[in-house]
Amino acid sequence: MTQIQKTISPVDGSVYVERELATGAKIQQTFETARTAQRHWRETSVAERAKICRAFVENFAASAQPIAEEITWQMGRPVTQAPGEIAGVVERASHMIDIAEAALADIAVTPLDGFTRFIRRQPLGVVFTVAPWNYPFLTSVNSIIPALMAGNGVVLKPSAQTPLSAERYAQAFAAAGLPEGVFQILHISHDQTAAILADGIADFVAFTGSVGGGRSIQASAANHFAGIGLELGGKDPAYVCADAPFDHTVESLVDGAFFNSGQSCCGIERIYVDAQIHDQFVEAFAQTVRDYTLGDPLDSKTNLGPLVRTSAADFVRGQTEAARSAGARGLIDSAHFSADQAGSPYLAPQVLIDVDHSMSVMTEESFGPVVGIMKVDDDAAAVALMNDSDFGLTASIWTTDEARALTLGDQVQTGTWFMNRCDYLDPALAWTGVKQSGRGATLSQIGYESLTRPQSFHLRTL
């Protein structure tokens, strides 16, 4: 019996997309086709792969506006902000294409008379990318482009919330001339995804999602030895020093906390502010948040859209009320945001003070438009609080003292340490996390390491 997957738009609660889920036979055929196509693709030169992947980038960028509108309808991001995801795909894909020749080159070792010795990076085979809904392109491009550039085949499973993202990939690759079968998509359920991992038909799994999802991925693949890359949750902190560039810091941290309605793995979820400027910072921060417009994400005046679904909004509502019951104070009157409505995905932003780490809003991932702000007396207190977390994706310091930033960066348990910046991925740097934020790395030259295997050549001349 055919199963139908329905995507409910958070914009108005309508069914926006319907897709048939693949059958078991279709899944097997997809991976077999990918494996056959990959054997030929791996023989294609890196230069030719780059030519095709650059054509993909051009084709993808040319469809920026309709893709942006689809993103808005599928997951609720304001249509004025959605094009930024397309620009990010172009930036990351272009960088990974540009560095591929050097990243995939043979690794020379110390010369030895009578021997030819080197290490070659070989493709793994078929990479299975499991993408989330919050940034369906920005997360998946991190593995898809380098996997293809390394000579792998790719099968993409999009989130049920953003199924059109996978189809946009397929269209752009087909127009770019990518050989048939090298890149394919599957609309499948969580159970079908688990079955793929249990069957061991993928050579590498690139997963982005929740901590619980990451555990399920590991458990399903436990009987096989495929590589697994996990980008999971975050509870990313910021430390605002007394010498921070004030206006820039306020503007950047408000954006870092509330862009995409806070639904970002590396969004700002907790802020620690030097006692000397705490009150001034809180006042300016809250006023900036009050200037936001919550409403129809298709309206150009809106800069805060609905959460992906009502249950997500209700989770944040629950966290906020629990914090208030424990003594926290909210600085934002939800009545100021007329679109805020209980029992809907439309949720007003909130700034909480008088918070502490006994409250879940300061320790558990919120993934919504709420942020807690705490006063700290010195660097040691800030570092201790930043490290008091099960997560470690990114963290940031806001100061004019670079030496201080470098010193504290060595003490904070995080994958990326920012100074005067947040909520950004630099494709030249490794994207990675510690603790429950995941394992492995994407982007940069290091990102190619998990998508290839080393083969040593040891040739003796007689």
Image (spheres, grey):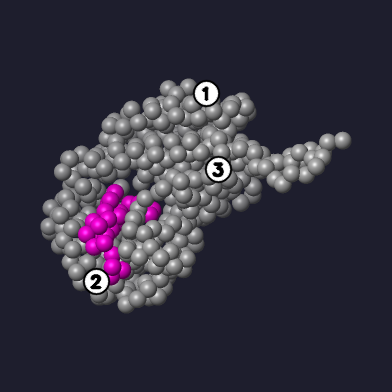
Give 23 or 1, whichever is nearer the viewer: 23
Residue 166 drawn at (x, y percent): 42, 34
- Is residue 441 magenta-colored? no
Q: Which corner quadrant holds the C terminus?
A: top right
User: Residue 136 falls in which quadrant of the image?
Assistant: top left
- Determine whether 185 is above or below 388 in the image: above
In the image, what residue type sits under mark 2? His
For the residues carrying marks 1 and 2, which lies nearer the camera in this image?
2
Q: Secondary structure at mark 3?
A: helix
Cα–Cα gap, marks 1 and 2: 58 Å
Residue 91 drawn at (x, y percent): 39, 39
Judging by the rendered image, the residue that carries numbered circle 2 is 278
Cα–Cα gap, marks 2 and 3: 43 Å
Judging by the rendered image, the residue that carries numbered circle 3 is 448
**Does residue 130 appear in this view?**
no
In the image, what residue type sits under mark 3? Tyr
Q: Is residue 426 left or right of residue 79?
A: right
State which region is magenta.
241-266
Q: Is residue 24 left or right of residue 62?
A: right
Cα–Cα gap, marks 3 and 1: 23 Å
Q: Residues within 10 Å of mark 3 (few under 14, many from 20)?
A: many
- Is residue 256 magenta-colored? yes
- Determine whether 44 is above or below 281 in the image: above
Judging by the rendered image, the residue that carries numbered circle 1 is 180
**Does residue 223 appear in this view?**
yes
